[in-house]
Amino acid sequence: MAASEQVEVELKFDVDPGHVAPDLRALPGVVSATEPETFSLDATYFDTENLDLAGNKITMRRRTGGTDQGWHLKRPTDIPGARRELQVGFDEARADGEIPEALVTPVLAITRCRKLDPVAVISTTRTVTRLLGVDDEPLAELAEDLVTAQSLLPGGHSQQWAEWEFELLSGGTTKLLKAADKALRAGGGRSASSASKLARAIGSTPTVHKPRLSKRPTALELVITDIALHRNSLIAYDPLVREDAEDAVHQMRVSCRRLRSVLSGYPTVLDAERTDHIGAELKLLARILGDARDSEVQLELDQSLLRGENASPELLAALAGAETRNHDRAIRAAHAAMSSKRYFTLLDSIDALLASPPPGPDAELPATAVVDQAIAKSRKHIRKAQADLADLTEGSVEWQEQLHKIRKRAKRLRYSIDAAEPLNKKKYREIGAVAKKIQSALGDFNDIRINRAHLAAIVADEKLAAADMFIVGRLDARLEADAYRAVAEYRKAAKDL
């Protein structure tokens, strides 16, 4: 189903009903203004019984009237005063039909299996004046709204109010926005009492959990703060993975691994019996996402290797064709897993953990004491793995697998230290930097190892022409040299651990 998305940047003000807006034609860059035009807008807003969308500052509505009637989904952005608006017109989805899938999918990580029902109806009499620049370029719109809202929640009531909305259009600038803010406040506008019409209609709602650290945080405070951070990251990347956005699979996988690393790296801070199942589910989800991510990495590596080579279509197909098919299958598997009840149950379990953390035996210890203990334990495990590596024949399969084990342990150390970032300790950052270098070098080595195995399989298949076989040999030699460099970088970094 076709949908369009844009970022809207607007100002919102409360005003007294009937108060006339000031003339904005004197604002910087404005040459003229259109005649005011009045519309009647009728909107029905949807949310879950728990108001999950409102709690995340998201609105979903079906609106008739005006120039953009249809289904709308508005979500926050990192830009102050800006929101992403996804629209599906009534030519694509009926006004009296079900909510379009294009609006439901981006918020599945928030709504999960919960039903979306009407929570408010809002009618607006809107008078719009458009500000124009040179050559009638649209700069901004001023909407003077008279609003009548009816909450459909238990105990909800109706209310009326007036407000102004000033929205930048394609030619608008930050300078114009600042000038409009000043002029509208001088003309009688007051800071908006609510972020949106829906928020004012239904009143207070639960909000996303944002724990705060005290000046001398306990281990439990630190761990819960980090879990909340990565939970929010996981939720943020979910819709991006569903739309196959660049690097989204990688970032969502990292969020899973970081969440799991906090649980495994600080096992005595929370009650393990009540959190082990979360770690196991996160491990499974990371593995599913990992299949897609690994194929992405191999595709990128293949493309970089072939750059400048006169490869035949057959070699291109042998290198990238199978990997592309693998990636497509892995993405479909990830999407299926992310639409399953099991996935939504995992998200519910993380939210329940944040809302009511089950303390472990070390929960009330100072955060620094527990971090020091976790770092010491991780470094000990890495050094043990390095000692075992020394007993293996360099280049053997067992030796390569041991390097992979060291990489995973370095990553666990790094994530444990990242959790301690709010403590702002220089010694933690220094150790974390070393762990990152080890992880990065051995990660490169592992990617190279997988790609060399892929090249070996292509050669064993004996279907390529002699010229292509020569290219494959040259690619393998380059990868072998890269592998030596990666191991050298690891050894250099390991001296500082």
Image (spheres, rainbow, N blue to C red):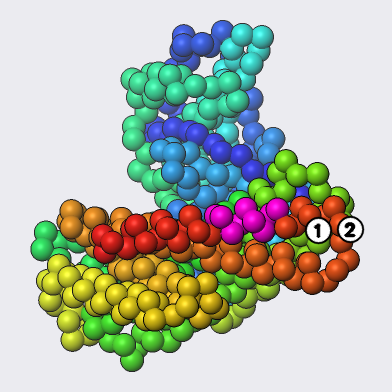
Q: Amino acid at mark 2?
A: Ala
Badge 2 element = loop
Q: Residues within 10 Å of mark 2 (few under 14, many from 20)?
A: few
Q: Is residue 407 left or right of residue 128?
A: left
Secondary element at tag 1: helix
Q: Position of residue 124 (x, y in %)?
A: 56, 41
Residue 168 - label: none
Q: Residue furthest toward the front?
A: 393
The residue closer to the viewer here, 337 or 165, is 337
In the visual, does 26 lie left or right of 359? right
Q: Position of residue 116 (x, y in %)?
A: 59, 67
Q: CA distance from mark 1 to mark 2?
A: 6 Å
Give me the residue at 46% from left, 19% from top.
176
Q: Main secondary structure of the magenta part?
A: helix
The reply to whether discs 1 and 2 touch (Cβ–Cβ < 8 Å) is yes
Q: Is residue 324 above or below residue 129?
A: below
At horizontal 64% and vertical 25% (from top left) the residue drawn is 37
Residue located at (31% from left, 87% from top): 272
Instruction: Report the number of numbered marks.
Output: 2
- Region rendered in magenta: 474-482
| Residue 272 visible | yes
Q: Amino acid at mark 1?
A: Met
Q: Position of residue 380 (x, y in %)?
A: 26, 77
Q: Quadrant of the C terminus?
A: bottom left
Residue occupied by mark 1: 469
**In this view, 149 is above or below 249:** above
Neighbours of disc 1 within 10 Å: few (<14), some (14-19), many (20+): some
| Residue 140 among those drawn in magenta | no
Q: Quadrant of residue 108?
A: bottom right
Residue tagged 2: 465
Which residue: 78% across, 67% down?
458
- Image coordinates of residue 329 in percent, x first then y, are 73, 70
